Amino acid sequence: MKNAKAQYRRYTRSSWGNFFYFFFLILFGLFSVLPMVYTVCTSLKPLEEILIFPPRFFVTRPVIDNYTALPKLLSNLSVPLSRYIFNSLFVSVSTTVLHIFIASMAAFVIAKVKFKGSKTLFLLIQFALLYNAYTLAIPQYVIFSKLNIIDTYWVYILPYLPSTLGVFLVKQFIDSSIPDALLEAGRIDGAGIFRIYYQIALPIMKPAWLTLALFAFRDIWSMQPAGTIFSEELKMLPNIMSTISAGGIARSGSAMAATVILLIPPIIVYMVSQGSVMETMGSAGIKG
């Protein structure tokens, strides 16, 4: 009994250890939200507090003038604000939905359908994770030019559909969460491959595709294509923030107000899917 107690004490933290552990977790958590706090504070600062030197982090006399000034600043745009809002919502929602279905179907086939070369294909997908957006910019532009889709909605949508990260995450989740016996039972009942995917696998994959929805919506909502969108009617809300920021330091409060408004949809998506992110990352071998 005494040895068991000694072993228990050896592998558990002391009360001081727990205190410092949670203290540093809370400290780093607060540090990570400082940019968001600064953005909100700056959006509520009057002009005299923005121009003060040395600058202050927090606001002492909060006002909503930066928010009420946005309609006046945006009224001079050549395209109505509603058009930018429509473009952002249309591109973000449609691309996210298509991305979820394409990534989950590809991952399901690689994980559960036996065919020659499946392991090699998945190895190529993992290898493709090494490339970033800057590496692919020139090849993508050449492809878009050949397809004649420059300055169209397809420039927003097509690049994100074949996401290797989405296929990798969903495939790892399927391997750890969907047993072959469950799919075999569906085949015995006469279900085809697409019905098995849609009615059996897709509901079980809910944590994975909610995670994809968060990542995809976040990236697409803040997207600003360079050199591929020239028509003002096709630009999205982040372009407005760039336009307002170009007014200099006097408009930094309004620019921060626009940033706060742009942050609201991704935060809502995150609040809906936050529980699924850790589950998916854990199944993929990625620890937060």
Image (cartoon, rainbow, N blue to C red):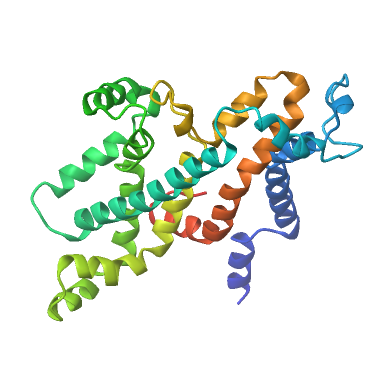
The answer to whether 5 is drawn above or below residue 104 in the figure is: below
Above or below, 7 relative to 259: below
The residue that appears at 48% across and 34% down in the rendered structure is 223
Q: Residue at x 40, y 20 (%)?
A: 227
Q: How many numbered marks are there?
A: 0
Dividing the picture into quarters, in which one does residue 147 lie? top left
Q: Quadrant of the N terminus?
A: bottom right
Q: Is residue 169 visible?
A: no
In the picture provided, is 264 more to the left or to the right than 207? right
Of the pair 165 and 1, the residue shown nearer to us: 165
Q: Position of residue 159 (x, y in %)?
A: 33, 36
Visible in this render: residue 207?
yes
Q: Residue furthest left?
A: 116
Q: Residue furthest bottom?
A: 189
Q: Position of residue 163 (x, y in %)?
A: 33, 42
The x and y percentages for residue 237 are 55, 36
215 lies left or right of 102: right
What residue appears at the point 86 percent right and 39 percent down from the top-left corner?
63
Q: Nearer the viewer, residue 19 or 137?
A: 137
In the rendered image, the residue lying farthest to the right is: 61
Q: Relative to residue 111, is residue 187 drawn left or right? A: left
Please identify the quarter of the rendering in which residue 203 is found: bottom left
Query: Can you say whether 61 is above or below 269 in the image?
Result: above
Residue at 71% of width from left, 59% of height from top?
14
User: Between 98 and 275, which is closer to the camera in this rendering?
Assistant: 98
181 relative position to 275: left or right: left
**Residue 235 place in picture, x, y as percent:** 48, 32
